[in-house]
Structures are given as C-alpha cells and as structure tokens.
Image (tube, rainbow, N blue to C red):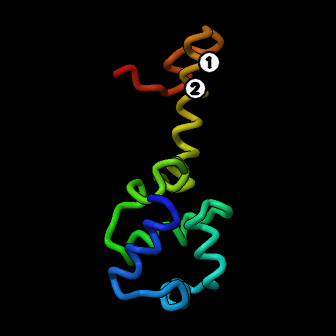
Amino acid sequence: MNYGAIHQALKDCGYSWRVAAEAIGCTPQHLMNISARRSESQFVARALAALIDKEVVDIFPDIPRYQFNKQTLHDLKVLEAKNRLAESGIVTMEQNNVKTD
C-alpha cells in the first residue's frame, strides 16, 4: 500500500493520523513518515497493520525486515552463513549442526 492507500484505510476505520499516532504512541509526523517510507519502525508498522486490520506484509511488501522479528532475521543469517561454510568445505555439516533435510 502506498501513503494514500494507508491514509484512506485509516479514514475508513474512523482514524485520523493524529488519533492513530496517539494510540500507537508516536507523533502523527512519525506515523506519516513510516507510511511514506521516509522512516522505518517495525513497531509502528505492526501497530498500523493492527489498526487497519491488515497484515504488515500487505501494507509494506517492499520492506522485508518488517516481515520478521530481529531474532528470526538473525537466525536466518546464521543458518545461511553455516550453510555457506559447509558448502565450501571449510566445516562439516556435523560441526555446524546444520540439518540436511
């Protein structure tokens, strides 16, 4: 969704930028900046999704880090690195504790 679509979705739910921002705990300007992709905040993005009853991926499909929490991203990066090391023969799969299925 773009900025205009997010704004319209908020209005359809009966919320202004100001009301939504106050409920989320940020300023209206910050909420508008997140919606316009000028700033990033996973918390605000998820709260906005909850307010308009949409999935965060439907609102911000262009920002992959909103789709996962930080620990999940970290775990995925570690797994990717372990697989790379195993593929290059630097370490074995057993040393890496990498599942092969």
Label 2 sits on residue: 82
Note whether 78 is above or below 19 in the view shown.
above
Secondary structure at badge 2 equals helix
Indicate left or right for 100 with 82 as reference.
left
Q: Position of residue 93 (x, y in %)?
A: 50, 18
Report how many numbered discs are placed on residues in the image.
Answer: 2
Task: Please report the residue visible at 43 percent of the width from the left and 66 percent of the height from the top.
Answer: 5
Q: Of 50 and 99, which appears nearest the observer? A: 50
Quarter of the rendering containing residue 53: bottom left
Q: Quadrant of the N terminus?
A: bottom left
Secondary structure at badge 1 equals helix
Residue type at the position of mark 1: Leu
Residue type at the position of mark 2: Lys
Indicate left or right for 37 with 98 as reference.
right
The crowding category of the residue bearing disc 2, from other C-alpha atoms within 10 Å (few below 14, some 14 to 19, many at least 20), is many
Find the distance from the CA under tag 2 to the CA under tag 1.
5 Å
The crowding category of the residue bearing disc 1, from other C-alpha atoms within 10 Å (few below 14, some 14 to 19, many at least 20), is some
Q: Position of residue 64 (x, y in %)?
A: 52, 47
Q: Of 88 and 2, which appears nearest the observer? A: 2
Task: Please report the residue visible at 56 percent of the width from the left and 15 percent of the height from the top.
Answer: 86
Q: Position of residue 101 (x, y in %)?
A: 33, 22
Label 1 sits on residue: 85
Please say if the residues under marks 2 and 1 sit with CB atoms less than 8 Å apart: yes
Extreme residue in the top direction: 89
Note whether 10 is above or below 60 in the view shown.
below
